[in-house]
Amino acid sequence: MGAAVTRTPTAGPPADLLLRGGTLVDGTGAAARPADLAVTGGLVTVLPPGTAVAAAETVDATGRVVTPGFVDVHTHSDALAAPFCGGAHTDGDALEELRLAPLLQGVTTEISGNCGISLFPALPGRLSELAGHLRVSFGLGPVRPAEEFTDFAAGQRPDLRRTHLASLVGHGTLRAGVMGFEDRPPRPHELALMCELLDRALGQGAAGLSTGLIYPPGVYADTEEIVALAKVAARHRKPYVTHLRDEMSQVEKALEEALEIAVRSGAALQVSHHKTAGRHAWGATLRTLPRLEQARADGVDVLCDVYPYTAGSTVLHAMLPPWTSEGGPAALLERLRGQEVRDRIRYDIENGVEGWENTVGNGGWDLISVAAAPARRPAEGRRIADLAAERGADPVDYVCDLLLDARGEVTIISHSMREDDVRRVLASPLSMIGSDGVPKPGRPHPRWAGSFARVLGHYGRAQGLLPLELAVHKMTGLPAARFRLAGRGVVRDGAVADLVVLDPDTVLDGATFEQPLLPPVGVDTVVVAGRVAVRDGRPTGVRAGEVVRVR
């Protein structure tokens, strides 16, 4: 049974909502304590337990823990509430199930625009090219870029927005919008224009700068280019958020590049979904985490985020050498038709390419499964090696044909990490929680629906890796401070009333790789902007999310 709800007469009540009888874990990391919470006009007042307060609605949280709403610092949900995110391969029910997944586990704020991919900014002359790039990245139909952050914010439909949304500025979007998908350094005027567009977006409320240095066109950028852009973020006191150039065999070298960018630019550094993946990097967290701690001791403002799984997820075309994507998605697909190109891909996977992560070479096609492939739904949830074998095909040929059939819109799940590495990053004092959710219909990674409940239930309660107060801090106060989300992340007087009521004895993720959108158990009530959006573990229909501008 969930938290009991009663209603009192609404004539002139001093509070809209009262949460009484619960144990408050306030997001700061401080010890849990009994407290009641009154919500008026979307803001919180913390009260001594048992304070007499009349309210239009009361939630009895006896035996439950009350926390701030969780902040998912790493999502790819940019287009889920955009009016153009549908398409021939999607339907309203599937998209609504994806929108609800984070909310049902207590997430009230998402940070999108990660890994260098955001829906803005766009120059009119590059709209078509950018649209193709975003369609392949998001896989939600005819996704179109916004010209500025203000257009992005205006395009988020309030009738679809279940959670709040902040967004980073994607370097890949900046680069593609200014110079396309060319593998070369930017000319001075091109770099100046990228800096100008970034400066404008950050001034309008974007939350920081992101890079995805394994993805075209970000993979074509050198360190100097990123330093110049990170200096713009530093002027706005907003972080540089990076998917490292390599998270596998060269992860330590890639981490040094990120630290160099932070030192030279003066920007705070956020290492996205920190991992050491692939057999050549297993165990490397024994070195990367102490290196981050030393850098922080030396004055570098560096933190990281992590999701609680040993498998990652990304786009299928990222499994191919970077040269295949030069010129953009249309050029990629045309290129994949040629037998000589396929032979070269096979050679590069087997032998490697300088500066390329090479996920398949570090693992194998047997560790990669199809997550979403609208053109081949029966392939979803199955391993590439098995699918190729059934057709009597070489895996590279199968992958090229699959990408051609799907016009590039294929995401995958890669089983590439080791449990001890994941545990070390989760336990690190520098880490916070992010799902890295890629919410596309099909068989998405269960992290989109399960990350936060999994940390609390599996790693916190069952394994004792994190005490409850610390786990909640990693999901609330720490990320809110990192991304300057004013009034969020900590329950205190005057805070935004984004709240979660959960049962600490039962909370647990339900999502699996076979059923990736199953909701968690033990999350009773979720309040978004002072309105009850989840009651007894079920959505109420409230859509109170808004676009958050970071100033």
Image (spheres, helix red, strand yellow):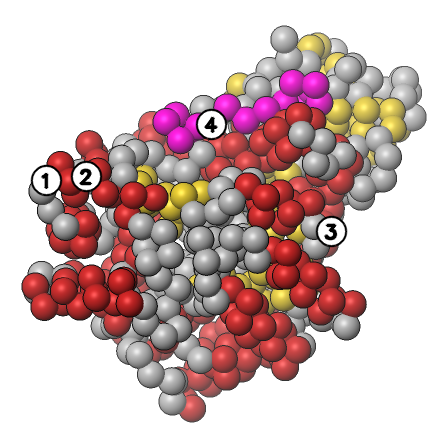
Residue 414, image x, y percentages: 38, 46
The reply to whether the C-beta atoms of the residues labelled 2 and 3 are less than 8 Å apart is no
Amino acid type at circle 1 is Arg
Q: Amino acid at mark 2?
A: Leu
Find the residue positioned furthest to the bottom: 188
Find the magenta span and give its range: 498-517
Which quadrant of the figure has residue 51? Answer: top right
Q: Is residue 345 left or right of residue 120?
A: left
Q: Is residue 153 magenta?
A: no
Residue 110 locus on image (x, y percent): 55, 45
Q: Contact, CB < 8 Å: mark 2 with mark 1?
A: yes
Q: Residues within 10 Å of mark 2 (few under 14, many from 20)?
A: many
Q: Residue at x 41, y 77 (%)?
A: 221
Magenta span: chief secondary structure: loop
Mark 2 sits on what residue?
Answer: 387
Would residue 419 be seen by someone viewing this image from the given angle?
Answer: yes
- Tell me the SS state at disc 2: helix
Residue at position x 66%, y 78% from top? Answer: 263
Label 4, label 1: how far apart the Cα atoms are = 31 Å
Where does label 1 land, which residue?
391
Q: Which mark is residue 511?
A: 4
Answer with mark 1 or mark 3, whichever residue precedes in sequence.
1
Viewer-proximal residue, 88 or 214?
214
The residue that appears at 26% across and 72% down in the rendered structure is 323
Say if 230 sits above or below 89 in the image.
Answer: below
Instruction: Find residue 314 and name its label.
Output: none
Residue 197 in the image: x percent, y percent?
A: 47, 74
Between 544 and 432, the one lying in front of the other is: 432
- Residue 513 falls within the magenta-colored stretch: yes
Q: Earlier in the sequence, mark 4 or mark 1?
A: 1
User: Residue beneath label 3, please?
Assistant: 429
